[in-house]
Image (cartoon, rainbow, N blue to C red):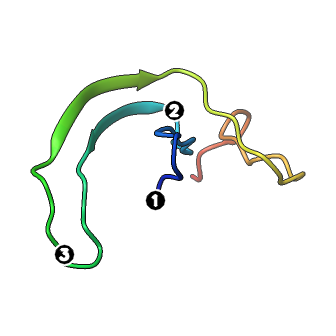
């Protein structure tokens, strides 16, 4: 992710569940990078998705094969 001047934030899409986040800075011209800085473990309780008008298939009401 490349940030524009004056903005150090970005939206990311993640599924509901547990996410471990961290960051590092990289000089793309030289390949030099800082060590990874962990931010921590977070729980994502609600995940929204843009687009797609087809309902997802669920297992409710589905019978097991005999």
Residue 60 found in image quarter: top right
> Residue at horizontal 75%, vertical 47%?
56
Q: Position of residue 37 (x, y in %)?
A: 16, 39
Could you give the CA–CA distance between mark 3 and mark 1, rounded to whole angstroms?
Answer: 14 Å
Q: Would residue 14 appear left or right of 23 to someone viewing this image?
A: right
Q: Would residue 9 appear left or right of 19 to someone viewing this image?
A: right
**Residue closer to the observer: 39 or 33:** 33
> Residue at horizontal 65%, vertical 40%?
59
**Residue closer to the observer: 47 or 37:** 37
Could you give the CA–CA distance between mark 1 and mark 2, rounded to whole angstroms?
Answer: 25 Å
CB under 8 Å between callouts 1 and 2?
no
Q: Would residue 37 appear left or right of 14 to someone viewing this image?
A: left
First in sequence, mark 1 or 2: give its number.
1
**Residue closer to the observer: 12 or 44:** 12
Mark 3, other Cα within 10 Å: few <14 / some 14–19 / many ≥20: few
Q: Would residue 23 appear left or right of 15 to someone viewing this image?
A: left
First in sequence, mark 3 or 1: give its number.
1
- Quadrant occupied by the N terminus: bottom left
Depth-wise, is mark 1 or mark 2 nearer the camera? 1
SS for dot 2: loop
**Residue closer to the observer: 47 or 10:** 10
Q: Position of residue 42 (x, y in %)?
A: 35, 24
Pointer 3 residue: 31
Residue 29 found in image quarter: bottom left
> Residue at horizontal 18%, vertical 75%?
31
Pointer 2 residue: 16
User: Which numbered circle lies on residue 2?
Assistant: 1
Mark 2, other Cα within 10 Å: few <14 / some 14–19 / many ≥20: few
First in sequence, mark 3 or 2: give its number.
2
SS for dot 3: loop
């Amino acid at each position: 992710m490349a940030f524009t001047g004056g903005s150090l934030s970005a939206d990311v899409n993640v599924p509901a569940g547990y996410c471990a986040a961290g960051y590092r800075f990289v000089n793309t011209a030289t390949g030099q990078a800082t060590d990874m800085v962990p931010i921590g473990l977070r729980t994502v309780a609600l995940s929204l998705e843009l687009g797609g008008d087809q309902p997802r298939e669920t297992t409710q009401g589905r019978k097991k094969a005999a």
